[in-house]
Image (cartoon, rainbow, N blue to C red):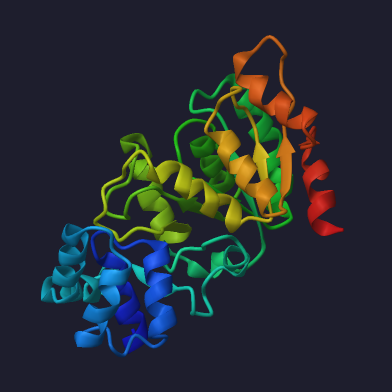
């Protein structure tokens, strides 16, 4: 790891450090050459609202333990990709406030190869949703579409079906790579770290918090050419991902469902609002390939 990446990653590990704070520091010191001297101390007070936050950051900036922790990522198979690296997802860089640093385990070549499709849906997957995936995925995989997401329900089924069809898949998690959540997804996540890819915008030892899940959705849609919603209730978290996709000008696809099923309320509403109704893989591929 070069010196700049090490310093940016160290900054990213500091408690209370936000995207805007890093932006401000980089604007004042683009190469982070002054990060460990008194110049940084003069910059910091302007961007922190409380003394406690400032004290935490200054303490973490001079922590040898954090630096050693970062050095141990590579031996543990974790790649650090900053926004300034070639490996950084090009599509994600086009979004609003893309992560300064991504932590990845697996095949990082998937971040910029092929066509990526985010697949999201209800945590309580029904037989209808599972059959829709089984019906569409073989053709999508055959055409080289990479499936993005990792959560319970529809999302986990999508990953398993992609792997079953010898396809490629990317998992995006809340929290760090050392804390896979939910626990039911740990087995498939560890398998993906070997042959597929799992990424996070949080340092590996970060425990997942509720607020991180909607933030994660912007990355899921951000690295993908389009988002497919299989099943979703009217107020489902899956719709957050769809909204991010719309904001970034990406394609949104939705599988129509039974008007009497609560698990179709969100997808049917998306179609009413302009999402493309999907009945087969071809409905998606014609947007991606032509």
Q: Residue at x 36, y 61 (%)?
A: 18
Going by the picture, which residue comes out furthest to the right? Answer: 290
Residue 92 seen in this snapshot: yes
The C terminus lies in which quarter of the figure? bottom right
Count of numbered circles on the image: 0
Residue 169 x/y as whole percent: 54, 53
Q: Out of 275 and 106, give the one closest to the viewer.
A: 275
Residue 229 x/y as whole percent: 65, 36
Residue 58 x/y as whole percent: 17, 71
Q: Residue at x 44, y 80 (%)?
A: 27
Q: Residue at x 80, y 32 (%)?
A: 279
Q: Out of 69 and 141, give the one closest to the viewer.
A: 69
Residue 44 x/y as whole percent: 27, 73
Q: Is residue 91 left or right of residue 87?
A: right
Residue 54 vertical position relative to residue 24 in the rendered view, above or below: above
Quadrant location of residue 29? bottom left
Residue 10 vertical position relative to residue 224 in the rendered view, above or below: below
Q: Is residue 64 left or right of residue 17?
A: left
The N terminus lies in which quarter of the figure? bottom left
Residue 37 seen in this snapshot: no
Q: Out of 57 and 111, give the one closest to the viewer.
A: 57
Q: Residue at x 30, y 80 (%)?
A: 7
Residue 179 vertical position relative to residue 3 in the rendered view, above or below: above
Q: Out of 71 and 48, give the one closest to the viewer.
A: 48
């Amino acid at each position: 790891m070069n010196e700049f990446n090490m310093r940016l990653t160290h900054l990213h590990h500091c408690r209370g450090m936000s995207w805007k704070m890093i932006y401000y520091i980089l604007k004042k010191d683009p190469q982070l050459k002054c990060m460990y001297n008194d110049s940084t101390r003069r910059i910091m007070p302007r961007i922190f609202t409380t003394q406690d936050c400032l004290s935490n950051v200054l303490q973490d900036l001079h922590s040898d333990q954090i630096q050693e922790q970062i050095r141990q990522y590579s031996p543990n198979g974790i790649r650090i990709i900053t926004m300034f690296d070639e490996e950084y997802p090009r599509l994600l860089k086009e979004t609003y406030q893309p992560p300064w640093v991504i932590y990845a385990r697996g095949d990082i070549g998937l971040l910029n190869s092929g066509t990526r499709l985010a697949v999201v849906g209800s945590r309580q997957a029904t037989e209808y949703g599972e059959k829709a995936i089984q019906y569409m995925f073989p053709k999508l995989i055959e055409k080289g579409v990479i499936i993005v997401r990792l959560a319970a329900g529809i999302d986990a089924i999508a990953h398993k079906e992609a792997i079953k069809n010898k396809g490629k898949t990317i998992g995006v998690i809340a929290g760090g790579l050392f804390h896979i959540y939910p626990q039911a997804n740990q087995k498939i996540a560890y398998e993906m770290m070997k042959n597929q890819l799992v990424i996070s915008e949080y340092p590996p030892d970060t425990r997942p918090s509720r607020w991180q899940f909607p933030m994660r959705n912007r990355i899921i849609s951000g690295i993908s050419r389009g988002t497919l919603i299989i099943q979703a209730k009217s107020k489902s978290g899956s719709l957050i991902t769809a909204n991010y996709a719309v904001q970034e000008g990406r394609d949104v696809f939705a599988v129509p469902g039974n008007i009497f099923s609560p698990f179709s309320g969100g997808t049917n509403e998306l179609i009413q609002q302009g999402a493309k109704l999907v009945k087969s893989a071809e409905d998606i591929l014609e947007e991606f390939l032509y």
